Amino acid sequence: MKRFLAMTALTSVLATGAMAATEEQTNLINTYAPDVDVSMLTDDQVIQAMAVANSGDSDTQKRQGIETIAMRDAAPSTFSEEQMAQIEAYLPADRVVMLTGEQRGDALAIINGASTDDDIRAQLEALGEDITPALTPAEITRVETLAPDADLTVLTAEQVSKIRALIYTDENDAQLKGRLMDVVS
């Protein structure tokens, strides 16, 4: 009977999805990143933010790390020069330019969340295996010509792949315009 009750309780907890961060976790995360809405973070993001908050990094590094983790699901459209320099400390500039916003956010989360340079480099290399390069300047120009209202700053790797496949087809511009808008909207 005890096993049955334990399994029932476990099943109901797992079935309800993500569990909210505790008040202590929320307070600690907001100590370093007061603008982060902890209630909107996934369990995995809370765990990662707690690891950053409890790390030996400076308060500024903790803030940046937690904010990067919080923004991971909604990749920022722009990155500061400081953030780009952080990534370029571990990856060549020509490779950083080819990263999508989502990939840059992931890279910043790794940089701000790992404890040693070796850990950071290893995780970025693993991230690099899944990297689909962002659109080239020529591809951006082509898309902007066909779909001037498209926001190309927040593309996912999947969208980049679809756009690239579309713009290299033999379709006429009218057909491409509609299909491109479907991908970016």
Image: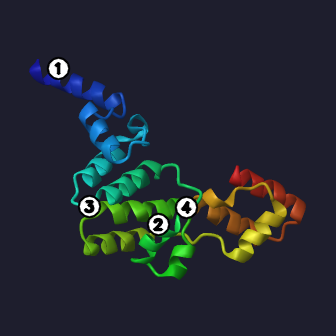
Return the mark for residue 57. 3
Of callouts 4 and 2, the N-terminal one: 2
Disc 3 crowd, CA 10 A, few/some/many (<14, 14-19, 20+) = some
Residues at marks 3 and 2 touching, judged by CB atoms closer than 8 Å: no
Of callouts 3 and 2, the N-terminal one: 3
Amino acid found under the numbered disc labelled 2: Gln
Amino acid found under the numbered disc labelled 4: Gly
Q: Is residue 37 left or right of residue 55?
A: right
Of callouts 4 and 1, the N-terminal one: 1
Residue bearing mark 4: 101
Tell me where residue 35 appears, x and y as whole percent: 44, 42
Residues at marks 2 and 1 touching, judged by CB atoms closer than 8 Å: no
Q: Residue at horizontal 47%, vertical 66%?
A: 83
Q: Nearer the viewer, mark 3 or mark 4?
A: 3
Of callouts 2 and 1, the N-terminal one: 1
Determine the CA span between mark 3 and mark 2: 16 Å
Q: Is 3 situated above or below 157?
A: above
Q: Residue at horizontal 52%, vertical 69%?
A: 81
Q: Classify mark 2: helix, strand or loop.
A: helix
Residue bearing mark 1: 5
